[in-house]
Amino acid sequence: MAAEVGQQAPDFTLFNNDKEPTTLSNSKGKTVVLAFFPGAFTGVCTTEMCSFRDRSDSFNSMNAQVYGISVDAIFSQKAFSDANNLNFPLLSDYQREVGKAYGVSLPNFSGMEGYTASERAVFVIDKQGVIKFKWVGENPGVEPDYDEVQRQVDALN
């Protein structure tokens, strides 16, 4: 079942690109942006993560925490983060449980039978842990409307 607007965000603990466990519920009191992406070092995913990086001052001024989430291993995410000077954590859903909990699993990604990635999706979660905005791309090549994500975060602060 997919996570929907108005529901409590499914809690999780994932390792970040610095090999530290990160638990979503520890972010209560902050607005959270979860940006699911299919894979590190791919063109659209790089553009997306860099777009969130470039807006970090706006998000930080609103006491918002951005997390990028993919099924990539923490080692790939660390290299991806370093290569793109990302200033927010990337979380590794290597067991693919969080994508499933949020309803954004993408099976047979890029024609690879049996390989499940994350769809490109964005969730904005309020300070109490309730999903207030959800966007799921119609295909992995479609980026979110970054201005709309920013408006959603601004509206919560």
Image (cartoon, rainbow, N blue to C red):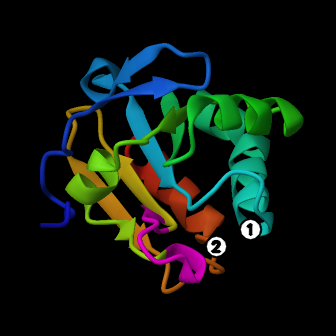
Quick check: 152 above or below 64?
Answer: below
Q: Name the spot of residue 90 as percent of width and height, x first.
A: 58, 35
Residue named by callout 1 = 44
Give coordinates of residue 46: x percent, y percent: 77, 56
Residue 116: in magenta span: yes
How far from the left and from the top, in percent, is residue 68?
A: 55, 43
Q: Position of residue 157 (x, y in %)?
A: 42, 38
**Label 2 close to label 1 by CB (< 8 Å):** yes
Q: Is residue 30 left or right of residue 66?
A: left
The image shows residue 140, relative to residue 125, as above or below, that is below
Q: Is residue 54 visible?
A: yes
- Snapshot quadrant of residue 80: top right
User: Which residue has dot 2 on it?
Assistant: 143
Residue at horizontal 39%, vertical 36%? 31
* Left-right relation of 43 to 88: right
Q: Nearer the viewer, residue 151 or 22?
A: 22
Quadrant that contains the N terminus: bottom left
The kind of residue on which mark 1 rests is Val
- Residue at the image point whose x is 41% and y is 70% from the top: 114
Dot 1, crowdedness within 10 Å: few (<14), some or many (≥20)?
A: some
Q: Is residue 62 visible?
A: no
Quadrant of res 43: bottom right
Which of the 4 quarters of the picture holds residue 54? top right
- Residue at left offset 61%, top offset 16%: 18
Foreground disc of the pair 2, 1: 1
Q: Magenta residues?
A: 109-119
Nearer to the camera, 15 or 86: 15
Residue 86 on the magenta span: no
Identify which residue, 101 or 131, lies in the foreground.
Answer: 101
Could you tell me how far apart the alpha carbons at marks 2 and 1 are, in whole angstroms?
7 Å
71 on left or right of 58: left
The type of residue carrying mark 2 is: Glu
